[in-house]
Image (tube, rainbow, N blue to C red):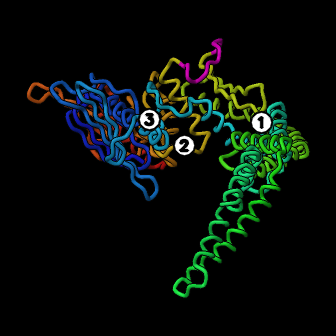
């Protein structure tokens, strides 16, 4: 509910503070006094188009602020319009985008008449209205669609389309088989092969080196012979006994070394075939590392990953068959649910159209007809409310109804039929071009709506004003050569005076005041 409205420097309004309450409130006043400017201020709060031309001449900026109470919460929307720049929007004192302001506005207020902020003009809102009226069960349709989406996601996660999966399986099988064929088991194999290749590739030079060493050790005048000569020279001389012992130990060690060298040299054979195998194996391992990892350990780990992925893909067929079967059932269930929703909507559309038409016909549109068109494709999401205001004229979508008054009265009728709406409903031009009993019907409809919502209506008709719970008079005067508008809540004699003015078109006569008093008394008796 809109509880407070503050306006500064907007058109003829220099400063205005208005406290509003629940129920049905009318805005009255002479033509040009600024009633529509009040409605325009509310539209600005809802994210309507701002123009620097709205700023009062001589002012730096215009400002509109509205305080809304929603349950236990409070929301403050504000809009400023500089005379030379872009407007700014605020929600609870914080700078916000106009789209955020519009989101709040759609939740808080519906405005009907010549202005654009009318939630029931959208296809989504009209569809929701029909569903509420017809009692459409959307739960089953939502559940079947959710299940279908879930199944499609599961199918997609299995590995893309069939050809992509087949290509991936072929590649992974090749990689697995290539690694398996190499029989990689020892991560130190490359180091061992490197040593073996060195041995095999230099067999002749290794043997020759060993034989040269043996000659140096064991030949005449070789190391062993020289050591023997040294031992003989020292003989048994006691001062050299320790040295002689060490020389004899050295001779024994050299003989062992010579024996080992001879054995090793004899075991080194030229084996070109084995050398080729070693070199081929080393090249294979280098190629595997180039493709699959920095080390042989990485190659083995990659092979395990490939095996796991292959299991997933090779198990696809069974899983895909199961999911495709489930998808077929889900598609059928979604189709049945969509058909059921469409039937409910198509069955409910004529009844809702008749109910709205009956209300519209009582609001000075006696020959009006309302048609609700439901799209041919199930579930009938394309819903459109059509109005034929006069006989012989084609029914038009509500968004294309030219007359602001006709549109406002149609929206009023719609709101009387439908129970769900924002807390605050604003009607401008709702009584345009009517009078007499039709005016009373409009007033009674607004009063009826005011029992469930906060209703604000601009009216020129005394019959409508008298049925309101409260009346706000908008007037203007000239101060210091400038036109200034004001708005005050009137009651008692002041309200009688205003309704009398509305009846007579000027200062109320005694008869007009008497008639005004009777209208107000009638309202109190009826309510």
Q: Is residue 138 visible?
A: no
Choose between 48 and 273: the one closer to the eye.
273
According to the picture, the residue beneath numbered tag 2 turns out to be 421
The numbered dot on residue 285 is: none
CA neighbours of label 3 inside 10 A, class few (<14), some (14 to 19), many (20+): few
According to the picture, the residue beneath numbered tag 1 turns out to be 160
Q: Residue at x 72, y 54 (%)?
A: 210
Contact flag, marks 3 and 1 (Cβ < 8 Å): no
Residue 237: image location, x then y, percent: 56, 85
According to the picture, the residue beneath numbered tag 3 turns out to be 99
Residue 152 quadrant = top right
Contact flag, marks 1 and 2 (Cβ < 8 Å): no
Q: Residue at x 77, y 60 (%)?
A: 262
Residue 263: image location, x then y, percent: 80, 61
CA neighbours of label 2 inside 10 A, class few (<14), some (14 to 19), many (20+): some
Q: Which residues are magenta?
A: 391-401
189 over 415 or under it: above or below: below
Q: Magenta span has 38?
A: no
Q: Residue at x 48, y 50 (%)?
A: 527
Q: Magenta span has 394?
A: yes
Mark closest to the chain's N terminus, 3 or 1:
3
């Amino acid at each position: 509910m809109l509880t407070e409205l503050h306006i500064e420097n907007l058109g003829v309004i220099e400063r205005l503070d208005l406290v509003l309450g629940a129920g049905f409130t009318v805005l009255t006043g002479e033509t040009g006094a600024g009633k529509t400017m009040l409605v325009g201020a509310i539209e600005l709060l809802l994210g309507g188009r701002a123009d620097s031309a709205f700023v009062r001449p001589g002012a730096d900026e215009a400002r509109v602020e509205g305080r809304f109470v929603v349950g236990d919460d409070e929301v403050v929307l504000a809009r400023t319009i500089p005379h030379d720049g872009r407007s700014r929007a605020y929600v609870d004192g914080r700078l916000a985008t106009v789209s955020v302001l519009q989101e709040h506005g759609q939740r808080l207020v519906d405005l009907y008449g010549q202005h654009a902020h009318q939630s029931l003009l959208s296809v989504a809102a009209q569809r929701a209205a029909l569903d509420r009226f017809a009692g459409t069960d959307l739960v089953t349709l939502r559940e079947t669609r959710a299940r279908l989406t879930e199944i499609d996601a599961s199918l997609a996660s299995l590995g893309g389309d069939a050809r992509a999966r087949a290509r991936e399986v072929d590649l992974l099988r090749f990689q697995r088989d290539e690694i398996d064929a190499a029989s990689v088991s020892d991560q130190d194999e490359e180091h061992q092969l490197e040593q073996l290749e060195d041995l095999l590739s230099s067999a002749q030079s290794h043997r020759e080196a060993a034989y040269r060493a043996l000659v140096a050790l064991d030949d005449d005048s070789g190391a062993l012979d020289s050591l023997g000569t040294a031992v003989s020279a020292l003989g048994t001389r006691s001062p050299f006994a320790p040295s002689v012992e060490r020389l004899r130990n050295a001779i024994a060690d050299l003989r062992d070394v010579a024996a080992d060298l001879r054995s090793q040299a004899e075991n080194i054979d030229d084996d070109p075939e084995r050398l080729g195998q070693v070199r081929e194996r080393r090249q294979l391992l280098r190629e595997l590392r180039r493709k699959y990892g920095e080390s042989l350990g990485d190659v083995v780990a990659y092979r395990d990953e490939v095996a796991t992925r292959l299991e997933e893909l090779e198990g696809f067929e069974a899983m895909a068959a199961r999911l495709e079967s489930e998808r077929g059932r889900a598609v059928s269930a979604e189709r049945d649910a969509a058909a059921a929703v469409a039937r409910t909507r198509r069955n409910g559309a004529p009844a809702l159209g008749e109910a709205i038409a009956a209300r519209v016909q009582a609001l000075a549109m006696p020959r009006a007809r309302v048609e609700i068109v439901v799209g041919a494709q199930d579930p009938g999401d394309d819903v459109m409310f059509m109005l034929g205001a006069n006989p012989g004229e084609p029914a038009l979508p509500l968004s294309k109804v030219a007359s602001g008054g006709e549109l406002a009265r149609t929206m009023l009728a719609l709101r009387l039929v439908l129970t769900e709406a924002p807390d605050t409903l604003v009607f401008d031009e709702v009584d345009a071009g009517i009078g007499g009993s039709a005016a009373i019907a409009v007033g009674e409809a607004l009063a009826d709506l005011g029992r469930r919502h906060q209703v604000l209506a601009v009216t020129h008709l005394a019959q409508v004003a008298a049925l309101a719970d409260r009346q706000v008079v908008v007037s203007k005067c000239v101060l210091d050569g400038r036109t200034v508008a004001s708005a005050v809540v009137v009651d008692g004699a002041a309200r009688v005076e205003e309704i009398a003015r509305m009846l007579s078109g000027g200062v109320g006569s005694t008869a007009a005041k008497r008639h005004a008093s009777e209208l107000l008394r009638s309202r109190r008796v009826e309510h």
